[in-house]
Image (cartoon, rainbow, N blue to C red):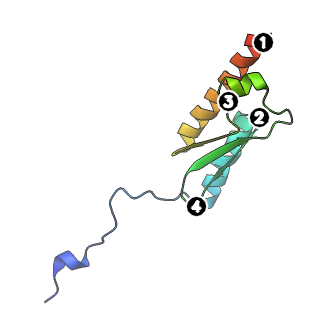
């Protein structure tokens, strides 16, 4: 007789589900639209990443203020928040030298 416990899936109920490619591409493109000067991608570990694409490099003041070239997050929403925070930090550093 078969054991009913052995026929159950061993996959955790909270395992992350990858998004369809078209939905993911749309979210990735949204980063560049919402935040000019940034591009995003999602790694094979399902982490979200964004990097600065602006032609002008970070200034010494921005680097000293803690600005980063690359940010990462677990979710798209978290990545948007981190990019937004980076933009605010860079703007604050620019105002400090003006």
**Which picture quadrant has residue 94?**
top right
Q: Which residue is mark 1?
A: 97
| Alpha carbon separation for disc pair 3 and 1 | 15 Å
Tell me where residue 86 appears, x and y as whole percent.
65, 29
Tell me where residue 37 appears, x and y as whole percent.
78, 36
Image quarter where the N terminus lies is bottom left
Q: Which residue is mark 3?
A: 67
**Disc on the earlier residue, 4 or 2:** 2
Q: What residue is at 63 percent from the left and 46 percent from the top?
A: 49
Mark 2 touches mark 1? (CB < 8 Å): no
Q: Residue furthest left?
A: 1
| Alpha carbon separation for disc pair 2 and 3 | 16 Å
Q: Which residue is mark 2?
A: 36
| Alpha carbon separation for disc pair 2 and 1 | 23 Å
Q: Which residue is mark 4?
A: 44
Tell me where residue 33 appears, x and y as whole percent.
74, 38
| Alpha carbon separation for disc pair 4 and 1 | 40 Å
Labels 4, 3: front one = 3
Labels 2, 1: front one = 1
Q: Nearer the viewer, residue 93 or 52?
A: 93
């Amino acid at each position: 007789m078969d054991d009913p416990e052995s026929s159950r899936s061993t996959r955790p109920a909270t395992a992350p589900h990858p998004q369809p490619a078209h939905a993911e591409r749309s979210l990735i493109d949204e980063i560049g639209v919402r935040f000019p000067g940034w591009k995003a991608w999602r790694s094979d570990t399902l982490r979200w990443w964004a990097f600065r694409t602006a032609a002008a490099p970070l200034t010494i003041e921005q680097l000293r203020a803690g600005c980063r070239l690359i940010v990462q997050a677990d979710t798209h929403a978290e990545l948007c928040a981190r990019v937004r925070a980076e933009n605010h930090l860079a703007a604050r550093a620019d105002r400090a030298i003006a």
